[in-house]
Image: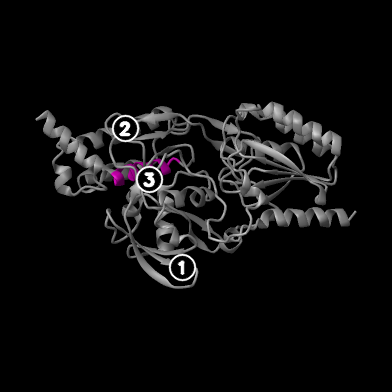
């Protein structure tokens, strides 16, 4: 009996979704998933910053009851996604359940990577064999138009503000469990998409999910993968580097890219800040541009030396000169960074809003459910960088959305707009 049960469980883990018959072959499955739902709700009530002193949201408990009743007819992949749906009711981006990394549910994804530009959802990268779809616009999933898919997706994304859906949502759309939840006519082993290619032709494409390679969270933006694309722009050239800077002599400016709030293997953030401060004291540039568009956080206690350098530079520029570039990927400790800069300097913000508020509930606090091994986090701390601030985000005064045309042509419209502003400010003196 034990070997038979282990074999049945192995079949369920390896299958892309699993039929009802397969799920019936594992008699402990329903009880297991239900016990995990109970454990998750108990953990939320005990640990979550808000829910440990207030009742759980009624919608959360209602949907948890419905999920308990639906276990038999839902795949393991779908169950993981539905757990994330429950977490989304908590209203913060640090409380989530992952659609991968569990003992239950195969970690399979579509062989395509998506990004939501100002003009739609596009394929920006692909596994070998599917790269011909790079540059295509997604117009439907199964029988569901893409606008409907994106509207339904909101309920399955843990987020601090709506930018979180734009950031996390396209990543979740790679997972068959997500598509089962929000798309109509989804066959788990072969996902039907409607794509419009760069020549304007629309066609239906059936894609088989592939094994998720090295899952580490939402990947950062990559340069255009289109054949013959122009040279990689500055903001996408060194995304994997923790931080770096360069002088822009044509603009009398220094450009800093700050990609993660952590020490790099070769240099601590404090050492980097001292080096940057020395350069600024030596050159006295007319502008300092700090780009945190790829920075999704890290360790906020490392921030003071860099913030102090920016405050010192800002104090020498009463008419402005400090620019901060933000995007949907700016999150967590990076949000604390930009909130401190907003509070203590006269910085001009450019790009699109970040995925968090100046003050937010957010701390990685790992949770692993005992039966399925589903992994996630329950936020247990409040960060108040600007006392009393209730904004949904720091609104950029130079608001620039990235279009698919600019992205695939390797253009940086945000930096272009900032350089124009630097020039206009210089001419106005």
Which one is earlier in the sequence, the residue at label 2 or at label 3?
3
Q: Main secondary structure of the magenta part?
A: helix
Indicate the secondary structure of the residue bearing disc 2: loop
Coloration mode:
one colour
Question: Start and end of the magenta stretch?
Answer: 77-90
* Residue 92, horizontal then vertical, whole percent: 49, 40
> Which is more toward the observer, 386 or 163?
163
Q: Which residue is pictured at 31% across the width and 31% down the height?
A: 39
Residue 89 quadrant:
top left
Residue 141 quadrant:
bottom left
> Which is more toward the observer, 429 or 213?
213
Q: CA distance from mark 3 to mark 1?
A: 32 Å
Q: Is residue 59 magenta?
A: no
For residue 177, the mark is none
Provide the residue designation for mark 3. 85
Provide the residue designation for mark 1. 197
Provide the residue designation for mark 2. 373
Image check: 291 left or right of 27?
A: right
Mark whose residue sits in front, 3 or 1: 1
Mark whose residue sits in front, 2 or 3: 2
> Which is more toward the observer, 127 or 357?
127
């Amino acid at each position: 009996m034990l070997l038979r049960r282990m074999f049945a469980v192995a079949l369920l883990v390896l299958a892309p979704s699993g039929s009802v018959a397969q799920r019936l072959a594992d008699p402990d499955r329903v009880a297991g998933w239900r016990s995990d739902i109970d454990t998750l709700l108990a953990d939320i009530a005990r640990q979550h910053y808000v829910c440990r002193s207030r009742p759980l949201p009624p919608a959360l408990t209602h949907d948890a009851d419905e999920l308990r009743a639906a276990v038999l007819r839902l795949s393991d992949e779908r169950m993981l996604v539905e757990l994330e749906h429950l977490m989304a009711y908590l209203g913060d981006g640090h409380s989530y359940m992952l659609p991968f990394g569990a003992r239950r549910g195969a970690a399979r994804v579509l062989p395509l990577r998506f990004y939501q530009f100002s003009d739609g959802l596009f394929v920006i990268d692909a596994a070998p064999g599917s790269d011909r779809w790079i540059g295509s616009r997604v117009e439907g999933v199964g029988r569901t138009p893409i606008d409907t898919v994106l509207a339904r997706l909101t309920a399955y994304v843990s987020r601090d503000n709506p930018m979180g859906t734009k950031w996390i949502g396209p990543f979740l759309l790679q997972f068959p469990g997500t598509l089962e939840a929000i798309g109509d006519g989804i066959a788990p082993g072969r996902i039907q998409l409607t794509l419009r290619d760069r020549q304007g032709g629309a066609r239906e494409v059936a894609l088989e999910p592939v094994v998720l390679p090295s899952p580490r969270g939402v990947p950062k933006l990559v340069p255009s993968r289109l054949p013959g694309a122009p040279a990689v722009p500055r903001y996408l050239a060194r995304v994997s580097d923790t931080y770096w800077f360069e002088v822009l002599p044509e603009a009398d400016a220094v450009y800093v890219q700050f990609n993660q709030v952590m020490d790099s293997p070769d240099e601590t953030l404090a050492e980097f800040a001292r080096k940057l401060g020395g350069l600024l004291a030596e050159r006295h540039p007319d502008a300092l541009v700090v780009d945190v568009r790829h920075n999704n956080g890290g360790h906020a206690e490392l921030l003071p030396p860099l913030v102090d350098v920016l405050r010192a530079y800002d104090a020498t520029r009463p008419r402005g000169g400090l620019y901060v570039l933000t995007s949907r990927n700016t999150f967590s400790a990076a949000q604390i960074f930009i909130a401190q800069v907003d509070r203590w300097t006269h910085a001009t913000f450019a790009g699109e809003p970040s995925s968090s508020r100046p003050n937010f509930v957010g701390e990685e606090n790992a949770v692993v459910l005992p039966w399925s091994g589903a992994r996630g986090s329950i936020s247990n701390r409040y960060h108040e960088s600007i006392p009393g601030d209730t904004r949904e985000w720091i609104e950029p005064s130079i608001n620039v959305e990235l279009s698919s045309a600019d992205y695939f042509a390797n253009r940086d419209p945000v930096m272009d707009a900032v350089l124009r502003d630097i020039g206009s400010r210089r001419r106005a003196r």
